[in-house]
Amino acid sequence: MAMDFPPYHFRCPISMELMKDPVTISTGVTYERVNIEKWFFTYKKKTCPATMQRIENFDTIPNHTLKRLILAWQNQGDSKSSELSNSPSDKHEEIEALLSTIMSSPFKVSSLKKLRSIIDMGEETRNDFISCKGVEVLVQILDQILTENSDFVTFRACEEALCILHQLPISEEEGDSFKLLSKQDSTRSMAIMLQRGSAEARLHTITIFKKMAKTNYDWNFVIQDQGMDFFKSLLELVSDEICSKASSCALEVLIEILRASKKNKLKAIEAGAVCVLIELLPESSRSRCEKMLQVIKLLCECAEGRLALVEHGMGIVVISKKMMHVSNVATKIGVKIMWLVCNFHSTEKVLEEMLIYGSVKKFLALLHMEGRSSTKDKVVKIFMMHGNSWKRYPCYPCDLKGYLGCVNEQAVDNFLDEFELYLFPQAG
């Protein structure tokens, strides 16, 4: 099917899209304002994209004549335009025509945008796109940013390719799609986009990584190839308070990566993960809080993670506040974190902070709750390890008896002895 493109001189040389606000630079070439300003001021380029002439004057002049011509062309086209056919065969032909254009033309962005609008139409067109080997074409575009001569236009094409890819099903069951995206060059390209892409491109990339994380994908290559930069880019997304979806996806990817190996945990700790998460926790939503606590728990399985937590001025405070305040899930994870700290890093300073900032009082409240649970078991073990140390402090809760329904300190000791016997009957 023949595709209707705007006349060449109506299109921006950078994006190859119809210009809305054309401006001319000192070389006499006209560009879309937002594109040329991004070229100059975001990417710090000092050349004309079309001619590669070096530029000293970065002023832009509105091209009113060209803008009027473009508007006239659009008005003329509106009277002749017709809606795209809903026929599956027409859609199939259109997908094949666009893929052919993308493969043969150096200017891919406009065709990728049209392809994106077709993919948006539903599952049938997405499946048709995959059967036409569309994923293979998009992966080739991703790989182009790894070449030394990749430029702004290549980068934009890569961003558009990611926009399409993130809408597709990606799992081991999908076969070819997963294999193509999990290739080393593909994952390297996406890791680069995660660091350098636009906000939209980073969201699309982390969405793809989230889908890959649900499989048995081995992250070792990405981590070895990108090092700490990969974790830093994930933590930047976690810190994104504007796009909650990107933050949530980044946390889910982190959880899967950290579960894989201790080496990954050490890299994340080195990248400052504990510090970032502790500072984000106070203002986080319920869902985000639970995921952050899960990441902190995984990091605290390493001595380095526990040390980072207790050395942060707000570490014990924040975890304490989240227990019994957010959700049962958050409380359960919070107790696991405290148990790890009490078990392996129970310095006098740490124990004192737990008492001062309310951890001990919440442990007692958990003991008073009915029923048996793994969380309550951990709390009992914590008291068995450190109860005597806490009793020495004057701020030790005087209403301990009220929590446990006991009459004196000796009764509390008896209660804990009985609880231990209840948990470990063979010890009796």
Image: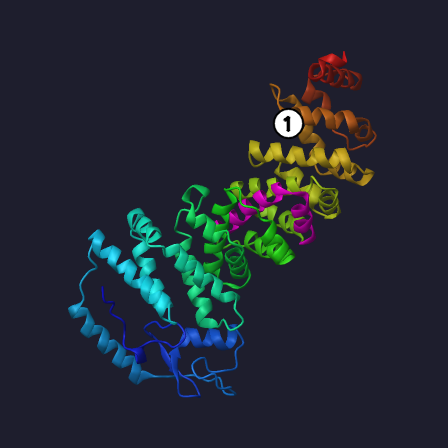
Figure quadrant of residue 317 = top right
The amino acid on which the numbered mark 1 sits, given as a three-letter code, is Thr
Q: In the rendered view, does 398 fall on the left or right side of 105?
A: right
- Reply yes or no: does residue 249 show up in magenta: yes
Q: Tell me what residue is drawn at x 29 percent, y 56 percent.
A: 118
Q: Tell me what residue is drawn at x 45 percent, y 48 percent.
A: 178
Check the picture and name the quadrant holding the C terminus.
Answer: top right
Location of residue 145 in the rendering, given as x and y in whole percent from the top left corner: 50, 66
Q: In the rendered view, does 303 fall on the left or right side of 320?
A: right
Magenta residue span: 244-271
Q: Nearer the viewer, residue 183 or 223?
A: 183
Q: Is residue 275 visible?
A: no
Q: Is residue 265 visible?
A: yes
- Reply yes or no: does residue 103 show up in magenta: no
Q: Residue furthest left?
A: 79
Q: Check disc 1 and report the residue beneath it.
A: 375
Look at the magenta stretch and give its main secondary structure. helix
Q: Nearer the viewer, residue 222 or 403?
A: 222
Location of residue 297 in the rendering, given as x and y in whole percent from the top left corner: 65, 39
